[in-house]
Image: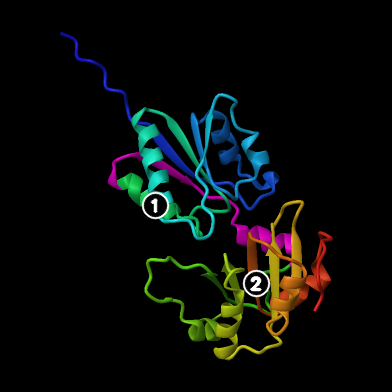
Amino acid sequence: MEQPKVKPKGKVYICGAGPGDPDLLTLKAYKLLSKCDVILYDRLVNKRILKLASQHSKKVYVGRESGDPSTSQDITNELMMKYAQEGQKILRLKGGDPFIFGRGGEEAEFLSYNNIKFEIIPGVSSLNGAAVYAGIPLTHREHSSSVVLLTGHESVSKKRSTIDWSSVCKAADTIAIFMGLEQLGYIIRRLISSGMSNETKIAIIENATTTKQRVIIGNLDNIEKKVKQNRVHSPTIIIVGNVVGLRNKIEWIPTIESKW
């Protein structure tokens, strides 16, 4: 008797969708949008990018808001496994780059542990996009030879912060902070208490690379007031350091902003 055919497992593509502007989507991501059966997409994926997907693909929102329970990641993992076991091609679409504060590493670990085939496709990081579209070079021969990337929203499972603020302030010329708006006051206090001057320049970039982008400029002493006055909302990227001052010379996209 002929044995029933076993349906092969599908494949998951963990893919960066870039910082927001659809024109910054990679060619590989564009091709995957047209050929994948299921798209599991995050909150920060521009809806215009989803319109590039095949009309036959199933689109499932799996985005997380700040403060959402960690179980939402478990649900995403279960969906990846479910559709892969059905033999589907799954596009796990993330804002920015999946390996820069995007949980791409965690999801790849999960897929590897469960013997599910996967590929990882890099995307333009929200940091790169925000900095370039704001006219702020992260490095500059005269102003910055080092950059450090921090999260402003550490895992709730940590008993205490693992960021050594004193070492960061001493080691890096430019500090870039993801998801830091809610903790802005705390971040500023830690930077100042670690030896950074009140006059250090800081930029808050809201909705980077999109038509809603705003850049709020100030220093550590007045940025909280400016953020409140301008009613800034997430998503934001925060850049701290002398390079912020170069925006006056090389700004190339006019935006509503508050000067220092």
Asked whether 208 or 188 is in front, the reply is: 188
Quadrant in which the C terminus appears: bottom right
Quadrant in which the N terminus appears: top left
According to the picture, the residue beneath numbered tag 1 turns out to be: 71
For the point 68% across and 44% down, which residue is it?
Answer: 22
Q: Secondary structure at mark 2?
A: strand
Quarter of the view holding residue 221? bottom right
Task: Determine if the magenta segment contains residue 119.
Answer: yes
According to the picture, the residue beneath numbered tag 2 turns out to be: 239
For the point 32% across and 27% down, which residue is it?
Answer: 8
The image shows residue 75, relative to residue 258, as above or below, that is above
| Residue type pointed to by label 2 | Ile
Q: Secondary structure at mark 1?
A: helix
Asked whether 10 or 144 is in front, the reply is: 10
Q: Is residue 118 left or right of residue 100?
A: left
> x and y percent of residue 148 in the render?
54, 73
> x and y percent of residue 105 in the render?
41, 54
Magenta segment boundaries in residue numbering: 113-135
Q: Is residue 178 left or right of residue 249?
A: left
* Earlier sequence position, callout 1 versus callout 2: 1
> x and y percent of residue 120 in the render?
46, 46
Q: Is residue 40 left or right of residue 75?
A: right
Q: Residue furthest top?
A: 1
How far apart, in angstroms, are the residues tagged by discs 1 and 2?
31 Å
> x and y percent of residue 226 in the render?
75, 75
Which mark is nearer the camera, 1 or 2?
A: 1
| Residue type pointed to by label 1 | Thr
